[in-house]
Amino acid sequence: MDRTTGKLLFAMAGALLATAAWAEEPIKIGIPVGLSGANSVVAPSVVQSAELAVEEINAAGGVLGRKLQLEIADDASGAAGAQKAFDSLVFQKEVNAIISMETSAARNAGLPIVAKGEVPFIYTSFYEGRSCSPNLYVNGWVPEQQVPPVVDYFVKKEGAKKFFLVGSDYAFGRGMLEFARTYLEKAGAQVVGEEYLPIEGTDWTAIISKLKSSGADALITSTAGGAPNVTLTKQLRGAGVKLPYGNLAVDEGTAKSMGPDAAGIYIAASYVTSIDSPANKKFLEAMQKKFSGELRTPNDLSVPQYEGVYLYKAAVEKADSTDTSAVLSALGEVSFAGPRGTVSMNKQHHAPLTMYLGQVQEDGSVKVVETFADVDPGTQCPNL
Amino acid sequence: MPESRLPNIRVWLLGALVVASLLMIAFGPTFLDRFALNVLSRSMIYAMLAVTVDLLWGYTGVLTFGQAAFFGIGAYATAMVLTHLGNSPELMLLAFALAILVPLVLGIVVGWLSFGYGTTPLYATVISLVLPIVVTQVAFSGGQWTGSSSGLVGYATLPLSLAGYFRLTGICLLAVAAAAWIFVRSDAGKVLVAIRDNEARCAYLGLNASRIKIVLTAVLAGVTGLAGFLFANASGVVAPENTGFVFGTELVIWTALGGRGTILGPVLGTIGIDYLSASLSGQLPFLWKLVVGALFVAMIILLPNGLAGLVGKILPRSKGARRGGGSLRLAQAMQAPQDVVDKPPLLAIHDLGKSYGSLNVLQGINLTVQPGELVSLVGPNGAGKTTLMRCLSDGTESISGSVSVRGANIAGLAPDAIVALGVGRKFQVASVFDSLTVAECLRMARAARHAPSLLHSSDELDLPSAAVEILKLTALDGMLDRPVSALSHGLKQSLELTMVVALEPQLILLDEPTAGLTKTERMTIGTILKKLTGELGLAAILVEHDLDFVREISSRIVVLHQGQLVLDGTVQDVVNSELVKAIYSGGAHD
Amino acid sequence: MTILLDVITTAAILFVVAAGLLAIFGVLKIINFAHGAWLTVGGYCAVATAGVGLNPWLALPVAFVVGSALGGITEVLVVRPLYRRPLDAILATWGLGIVIGQLITLWFGRDVQFTPNLLSGTINVFGIDYSFYRLFMILAALVVGLGFAVLLEGTRLGLSARAVIMNETLARGLGIDTAKVRLTTFMIGTGLTALAGVLLTPLTSVDPDMGLAWLIGAFMLVMVAGSSFGALAMACLVFGGAQTLVSTFVSPVLGGITVAVLCALVLRISPKGFARA
């Protein structure tokens, strides 16, 4: 009852004071994100890291003397929800930029709105690649960056020659595995099977039986995040599959929820919590301090979000304004040294990234097995 | 409405609403911000879908989740043409045509699957669940053709501004809603309600309910496809979720909350909820869903007709504005069947048998009925009387032997086709349409002869003179605008009989027409039957337990016992028969 | 050989998942579209049981009790007013499923939850290593099926339930308290569904949507089976088998929609499905 009211009053007073302290209007950053739907598992961590970035930047004097302010909207992890969220952010809240991790469907739904509203859009999720728009910059990885570490490691260190590919039937699943197939064939390995299940499918029985009889000596999967990934892994372990298992879609949090079943899985990511660098340590400590009990484990989607805010700050400062065209041209030139190392979106609106090959341990943590510095995103948008 | 000299509050409200919508469409863009314009454009497209759901579910009683699939197909057809073939006015026209035609054709197939004769009402729902699942899977598996999970985006759309789309969708919604509004108030629209209330009765009034529902499904699929075309243009993106089962359930939820069976309710409900969810759900996505879900459950249980139903109860009814009590026009007297010589008998049953598994319900029945005869079918419970009536009126029953009406073998014919041969059937329990008025029920009986208007609600009621006479005898003629649900049991029986007579049949099958009636009512029915057969030359077959009644009115009595025809003779023959006495005292077992 | 085991175990899983829905549909003629939500409730019972440190197998009785208690409340508040409106009952229970899903989300969060495995590893049958747990599901299906057979054939409740299935008016006339039969049946059906939810945890992810994926399949199988557990077993074998075969020899994507499409076609050809009236 009154405690809530008190809090509210306090917050309002704080806001008033803050408004008084900052002479100019804040710069608004819109975050459409899947608070409900498939992405709702990772969305809170993404919001948290953005909040930390904004807090740090504001504490250090803001951007061009202006405060940063977040506007968050639920995109329900899909196209219809994204339309509502982008409409609301771009036209109602009139944000200066969109920085967000989303599903591909949500991103695609947002692109026409971003174009109509003339707003820069930094996309911070890994994805299947080749989404090109003058307004869009990407600082997450694409197949060209993620698949080679896994394949190279399996071929060289595990001596794998026959690969079996399993995915969910959707753009990311197919995109990743198609690239993997080409890359494998180029590397001289053989693909002995490539199978997909509908994205909502729960029964992997037939695929697992095929895998077992295929004589494969390594497995690469690219399912939809969350449920399908867990379902597949549980059923694989239940069927006693113990092949080297590269999972292109698992994050540390999901791996933890699978318990012992996840142990041994290889993942390739541009971020794992165990990266041993001062920047990462500082970031993790700040997150722990700000959110303590509420903290959601930072991951390969939330950290690019954190860096995305800083990249936008750098671009605004370089352009010396929030003018969209000026910021868009600056975004391709600036860089930021964050938890993942130094990131710059200078390759056709995409970013070369340092990739880490990790293996999930019994306790759910990820141990870095090998590091691949500055992996190039390849040809993504030759026309930009 | 034209004659109404006393404009009532409903008409005023409706007129005000139309004017307000037109003003909103015209001037909305001048004061609404971009956000509102964008969201409302989409909400109005969804509202068009809700109208189609309302016509199918609210009016016709077909619970469907499948509109989402037709919508998605329309949207994908548009987006695929514009993405893969390019952009030109001709291609836009092609996209427009395909967006309507593809769902339309699929609608025919789905309708045929859903409403084949003998399928259960639930089956249409089953199909409507499978359809979006299949379509969504196709969208996911379509690779670059459909854009898989990412959908299609970045194609050229109609060159309209935000305000332009707002006005376009507004006009389309207004047109669709107005068309639906006019249609459901027309005589043809009442057929939908009749089908919802009592599909069997429709069939036995000669209406092919399956075909009507198939046509309705197909047309509405086309309208839905049009909405898909608008959506693909207005939003600039099409994704699998637009075509999925969950979206289909949302459409039903919006329709239910707004008020099914009201057209207006679903429109306002959809716009209201979709707009609110766009504005609110960002803050509280789970709580919002929880509230909508809980509201939906409560609404279904407590207020099945939604908010509009509640409003409708509060507002006074527009009583008698359209249908004056005395606007009856008599049609020419029914023609008695022509001379009987040279013609095959009206009804010829040859060696009819019917069994369920190893149980023989009917065996070796031979019977011929000529015009003018009033044949009573008597026998104890379980003798097979009702089964025999069913075999005479539904050719899809599997039987042995043959049944011919006016020389035509009825094997394989659905009830509505047999009605067309001149057979009318009255059921044991009064089978009428509870949501309609007396006049509307009678009009249903004429619908197979004179296609009802899609636009008007007629002020006249064309009935054969025999039917008019029954109305007068039973005093129903003064209750024409009374809702059927308010009639007494006896009056419902009389109404059903009038409906059957209004079919202008040559043979009437009556299953215990006097059950539960008072003595006077029974007398009236008896008089009517005698008149129909004696004066007008119809034939009637009557199943009856009341032997006194039978004796009084029959020209011939047939006794059925354990599935076999044991006696066929005049009233005298039967009344004096020892066998009949034995049967009724329960002694005879051959 | 593997494929034979795949077919049988897939059928067994489908049977366990659909049994609760069938119990309710068979007696009450009501389709419980909140079926998926009860599976989810079962899954979260497993999470909660493990959370307080109990033996994972204890989740089975816990889920049955929780599921049937919730079912009892639901029958009285939601389903009872709708027996005469079966299509509305579908909608009301679907809405209820949304409510339950959101309550679970608000309580436990959206995340995938950890559940300990009931049984792990493989055993060697006929020369192949096969998932021990999947084989166990055959046993579970048999227990559920036989349990129902005993319940229906051997108890007073079963007798009353069969009477209600055949002719409800007559049953009431014979002094059977049909309201009580319905309540009890609904509670058993939902309890069983929650129990099935626990049994699913080693095979699927536990999250607020876990049950939804099984709903349509279970619904279709029950439509084909009518009110008979024998017919359900048969339907699970035929359609589960078809799903496995299509997945193996054609494409798992087609396999995923096999059950729904085939059931719809069977119902078109024979509206009574596998049920012999």
Image (cartoon, coloured by chain):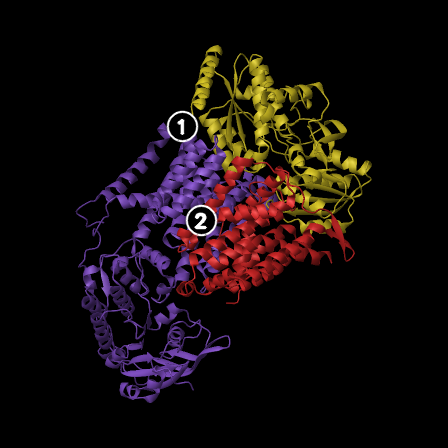
Chain colours: A yellow, B purple, C red
Classify A59 as above or below B18: above
Dot 2 amino acid type: Leu
Give the side of residue B293 with respect to residue B190, left or right. right
Residue name at image x 54 percent, y 50 percent: C191
Chain letter of disc 2 in the image: C
Give the side of residue C79 with respect to residue C208, left or right. left
Say which quarter of the image contains residue A4.
top left
Where residue A123 sits: x, y (%)?
A: 59, 29
Of the pair C243 and C124, the residue shown nearer to us: C124
Query: Residue under circle 1?
Result: B33
Of the pair B469 and A326, the residue shown nearer to us: B469
Query: Residue under circle 2?
Result: C91
Q: Answer whether residue B155 is visible to the viewer in this image.
A: no
Where residue B35 sits: x, y (%)?
A: 43, 30
Label 1 element class = loop
Say which quarter of the image contains residue A264.
top right
Q: CA distance from mark 2 to mark 1?
A: 36 Å
Where residue B51 sits: x, y (%)?
A: 38, 47
Is the residue marked by circle 1 packed among few (<14), some (14-19), or many (20+) residues within 10 Å? Answer: few
Classify A173 as above or below C125: above
Q: Answer whether residue B206 is visible to the viewer in this image.
A: yes
Dot 1 amino acid type: Asp
Classify B478 as above or below B424: above
Residue name at image x 52 percent, y 14 percent: A66
Q: Are marks 2 and 1 in contact (CB under 8 Å)?
A: no
Q: Quadrant of the N terminus of chain C?
A: bottom right
Is the residue marked by circle 2 packed among few (<14), some (14-19), or many (20+) residues within 10 Å? Answer: many
Label 2 element class = helix
**Does label 1 lie on the same chain as label 2?**
no
Chain letter of disc 1 in the image: B
Of the pair A90 and A133, the residue shown nearer to us: A90
